[in-house]
Image (cartoon, helix red, strand yellow):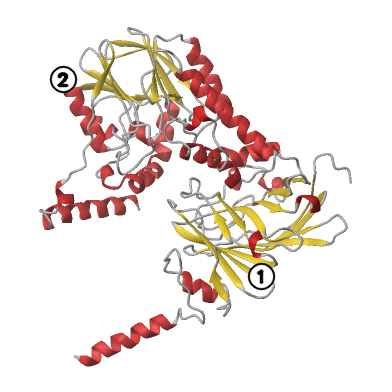
Amino acid sequence: MITTRRRACALIGATATIGLPNLPFAQARLSYDLQPKPAGPGIWMIEGSTDYFSMDNGGAIVNCVLLQGDSGLIVIDTGPSRRFGEALAGVARTLDLRGVSAVVNTHHHPDHFFGNQVFATQPIHALGDTIRLAQDEGDGFADNMYRLLGDWMRGTEVVPPRNVLDGGEVTIDGRAFTVLPLSGHTAADMALLDQRSGLLIAGDLVFHDRAPTTPSADLAQWSAALDTLEATNAAAILPGHGPLDQAGASIAQTRAYLDWLNTTLRQSARDGLDMIEVMQLPLPERFAAMGAQPDEYQRSVSHLFPDIELAVLPRAN
Amino acid sequence: MLRPLLAALSLATAAAAADDVRTPLTDPLGSGMWSYHQKELLGDPLDIRFDDRVIVQGPANAEDTVNVPLLVDATAIGDVEEIRIFADYGPIPHILTYHPGQAAPKIALRFKIDQATAIRAAVRSADGAWHVGSTYIDAAGGGCTAASHAYASDDWEERLGMIHGQVWADTGRARMIVDHPMDTGLADGIPVFIIETLDISDTQGQPIARLDLHEPVNEDPAFTLYFEPDATPEALRITGRDNNGNDIDGLITVAGYNG
């Protein structure tokens, strides 16, 4: 199924380029314009859009980080597609001629690891459970990403991470990190504290001015993970989505939103609301202003409400 | 030269005749399957129209293809006999028929979607006229052909027929969730296993409403029924049966009801 769809995409692409070379759409090749922004000494981020996946943004909605290692740049998260990974590799070569020396995936969601195939000759690190989840769910994610992003995805193959990272003090290409193996956004979420700069690379455990996503979430575990992140007293926080946070507000913002979400869904179940009615509830101003709202809230209702409702409603037999 | 052309034309006419309906309508969603369902699922009624008073609400995108929420509201139609809910494009189009009886002609449900499709609610009023409302839901696909989640747990048989629910008299609603795999028969090696009917009655056994379920209703069917707030029963008995003969029986009540 995936193969057929990809082949069909490739075929259509080929027809457009060879058969109709003068039409504007055949000339306007989709390309990512990735700009590295300094995020500390020897650290750069590629800042993603705070929107949802779309044909307009090509899925460039995720933050990727580049850190100076001994033999090249260490890349944290590789973006949504092969083409994004290629653009990321290009950015790396402008910062260090030796390019990328190692890769880390914070978790198994597609926007964080679908650029991996470009770096397949380098070590690609992740938590053990992330590797297993990427193997199990990668093809299903690919189906959906091809549907959402079309030709942006051309040639993208699922390359799960291979090198297991456990928690604790870890050195990657000569750079020292504290690896925090957590969960809550998914069943396995890694956060990394860069020891040289004190920067916390939080993955999708922290969102900043962008609504948190919940397709694989466990809200209680997520809350506990935020406790752990708060206790690091990091100098700055680089969230999975949204701008770099120098003031340390993003952890509290993520927690406030998830708490509100949980309370709202529980109260709605107690009031006997149906999912459609819950989706139509007005959002408080501070959460309505986040990127990707109200769509992300409505998706969260789909993810979380059925289980919450079963836990809240009394037995009838 | 002329003969093959004529043959082709008559073939085209024959193909069109299969979907010929007695009352042709212009489908506001322009979906290719409409006239087919008008004939096969609604029995080609003479008195039928698309009617904006039948409100069908669903998400623009089905985030979870095996749990797509849908809210159908035909309270503006008045005296409603039945509401047939179906998907234009689905391996099994018919989702549910609701006979509201003493309840309001309004229902919330969840269903499995197999691909992007128009969703219809065809409402038959007491005078025999059909009023049709629609919405369009985009989907990644596969909702009907996947195995149910139930068998991932060891205790699914003990949970079979378990009901969670409550009545809210102040807002005029009753919500119920019935534990059941609702297997469509489309997943390899798993036969059809569905609840076929749910009867809603008062505590004296007087019928209030009835639901006829089909394969696309979600695993662990979940419904909200609506009432006039001052005419909401304090308790509702839910009885039914699945196609394997398992009985379903439960009582949902307003919080604190001791009847």
Instruction: State the image coordinates of residue B69 (x, y, percent, origin top left).
Output: 57, 50
Instruction: State the image coordinates of residue A127 (x, y, percent, origin top left).
Output: 41, 24
Left or right position of A276 against A34: right
Above or below for B134 versus B163: below
Foreground disc of the pair 1, 2: 1
Category of crowding for the residue at label 2, using alpha-carbon neighbours closer than 10 angstroms: few (below 14), some (14–19), many (at least 20) = few
The residue at which mark 2 appears reads as A98
Category of crowding for the residue at label 1, using alpha-carbon neighbours closer than 10 angstroms: few (below 14), some (14–19), many (at least 20) = some
| Type of amino acid at the residue the image marks with label 1 | Ser
Please, what secondary structure does the residue beneath circle 1 have? Answer: strand
Task: Specify the subunit that label 2 lies on.
Answer: A
The residue at which mark 1 appears reads as B125
Q: Is residue B191 visible?
A: no
Closer to the camera, A116 or A316? A316
Q: Residue at x 83, y 48 (%)?
A: B234
Q: Residue at x 79, y 51 (%)?
A: B232
Left or right position of B249 against B74: right
Q: Residue at x 24, y 92 (%)?
A: B3
Above or below for A16 versus A49: below
Q: Is residue B142 visible?
A: yes
Residue B125 occupies which quadrant of the picture?
bottom right
Task: Specify the subunit that label 1 lies on.
Answer: B
Closer to the camera, A61 or B115? A61
Residue A118 occupies which quadrant of the picture?
top left
Closer to the camera, A182 or B85? B85
Closer to the camera, A189 or A284? A284
